[in-house]
Image (spheres, rainbow, N blue to C red):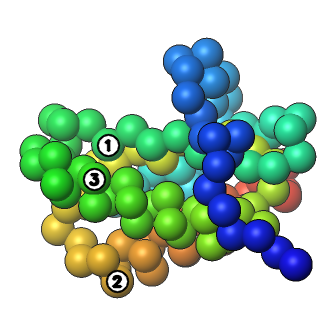
Amino acid sequence: MVRYTYSREQRLLTPGDFKPVFANPVRAASPQLTLLAVPNELGHPRIGLTIAKKQVKKACQRNRIKRIVRDSFRLHQHDIPAVDIVVIGKKGVELLDNAALHKLVDKLWRKLSRRCNES
């Protein structure tokens, strides 16, 4: 049975976890979000979120975006290869409604998975 949990082991927590992702990443981008990924040896994907206050002013909007991205990751984690992923929010991401944001993130997961499997 496939488990759809989002546990502590699936998160990038420390700056040391985030740093290698920025060194030489595989990218999947849209005008509103960028996903950066590097392979890991853990056997499962991990995710870290950076939604800057400079890009999205209101805390409730930043939290909504992070909640939707985390939920989408939880549902698609079994389709994503073993990589560390950093999701970066850009200007305009707060203008997307929940359905559009879910659709965008789902598309970016597929694009990222395809690019990680190629390299």
Q: CA distance from mark 2 to mark 1?
A: 19 Å
Q: In the image, what residue occupies the spot 49% across and 58% down?
A: 70
Instruction: Give the structural element (helix, strand or loop) at label 1.
Output: loop
Q: Nearer the viewer, mark 2 or mark 3?
A: 3
- Furthest toward the top, the residue is 16
Give how far across and how far down residue 31 sits, in percent. 34, 59
Looking at the image, residue 72 sits to the left or right of residue 89; the answer is right
Q: CA distance from mark 2 to mark 3?
A: 16 Å
What residue sits right under mark 3 in the picture?
63
Nearest the viewer among 115 and 21 is: 21
Asked if the residue under mark 3 is in contact with the one under mark 2, i.e. CB atoms within 8 Å, the reply is: no
Instruction: Give the structural element (helix, strand or loop) at label 3.
Output: helix
Mark carried by residue 51: 1
- Furthest toward the left, the residue is 58
Instruction: Give the structural element (helix, strand or loop) at label 2.
Output: helix
Q: CA distance from mark 1 to mark 3?
A: 9 Å
Image quadrant containing the N terminus: bottom right
Mark carried by residue 13: none
Label 2 crowd bin: few (<14), some (14–19), many (20+), radius 10 Å: few
Q: Nearer the viewer, mark 1 or mark 3?
A: 3
Give the number of callouts: 3
Q: Is residue 8 visible?
A: yes
Q: In the image, what residue occupies the spot 32% across and 43% down?
A: 51
Q: Quadrant of residue 74?
A: bottom right
What residue sits right under mark 2 in the picture?
99
Label 1 sits on what residue type?
A: Ile
Q: Quadrant of residue 78?
A: bottom right
Label 3 sits on what residue type?
A: Asn
Label 2 sits on what residue type?
A: Ala
Asked if the residue under mark 1 is in contact with the one under mark 2, i.e. CB atoms within 8 Å, the reply is: no
